[in-house]
Image (tube, rainbow, N blue to C red):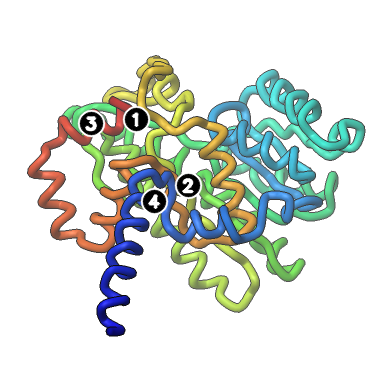
Amino acid sequence: MMWDLLLPCGLALAVLLAVLFAFADTDFLLALYEKFGKDCGSLSGKVVWITGASSGIGEHIAYCLAKSGCRLVLTARRVEELERVKQACISQGPNSAALEKNILVLPLDVVHFHKHREAVQTVLEHFGQIDILVNNAARGQFAEWIKVELDVDRELFETNVLGPVSLSQEVVPHMIKRGGGQIVVTSSMAGKMGLPGARSYTGSKHAIHGYFESLRTEMAGKNIEVTLICPGPTFSQLYLTAATERLGETLGLRMEKTQKRMSTSRCAYLSCVAMANQVSEAWIMQQPVLLTAYIIQYAPVLGRWLLKKFGPKQVQKIREGK
């Protein structure tokens, strides 16, 4: 009698989970935190430093955190764009007068490693603390593997890997001294699987995981959390500024509104939920990319076979939002 009840209940639960997963745009753990965990408002009052804050995901993370009452440091190369984001944050925040003095615009190119220590001191002089560092600045790259100049790999590695590593290395000692903090890094689905036509970008995102997983292990017991954010196809300016196979060349393409991509604001919001709940790693991507990430993570042999079976052209279409 018990089995007669358990079997249909189990089947019904399996069907329900399958339906929910079919429409999911994040991994199961982050989905649970979104529904039942801490909301972004729990970050209110914290000092959050965001690199790559002048556009894309970084810009929208700034908006989300401004609404949540955070004190912000906005960093990128373009001062005029940072000022634009600051004014937009002020208009969206709960207290415009307070936000005016609680948002610091700090122009910085992340590959200017010699300026990182000075930048950290500037933030500390202004706010007295750094609670969360969001390493979001990065550059894309698209070209055939065999055509890429090695100098392009070096350039992407400096921007996407050594920039975040160097800045974090200057911030972490302060966090240890204060008794805690959080390092957040915007990685990518490219950090979990081998994307065709993006060797420099994919390699740099895989490297990010190695560096910051190492940091996570070393910080055990020091109350320093590390959160890796892995977005899938998301609307941004990634194609506009992306490198190609030749050093100094830019792809210069804009994403089309008709493409199948996650909205920038949704990706940013889920990233902030991951921060608030100190998630170790968050997958923020629509189907079928999310399913692919699960297969690659938990059944890598099957995942690699599927990628070979369907071929790079199909993977390319998914990455391009087609």
Q: Which residue is mark 2?
A: 162
Residue type at mark 3 is: Gln
Residue in the image at 18% along x and 53% along y: 303
Q: Residues within 10 Å of mark 3 (few under 14, many from 20)?
A: some
Residue occupying the point 42% across, 54% down: 27
The three-letter amino acid code for the residue at tag 4 is Leu
Image disc number at residue 194: none
Tell me which label, 4 or 2, sits earlier in the chain: 4
Callout 4: 10 Å neighbours few (<14), some, many (20+)? few
Q: Nearer the viewer, mark 4 or mark 2?
A: 4
Tell which circle, 3 or 2, labels the residue nearer the N-terminal end. 2
**Mark 4 and mark 2: span between their CA atoms?**
38 Å
In this view of the protein, which residue sits in the foreground, 69 or 82? 69
The alpha-carbon separation of the residues under discs 4 and 1 comes to 33 Å
The CA distance from mark 3 to mark 2 is: 27 Å
Circle number at residue 141: 1
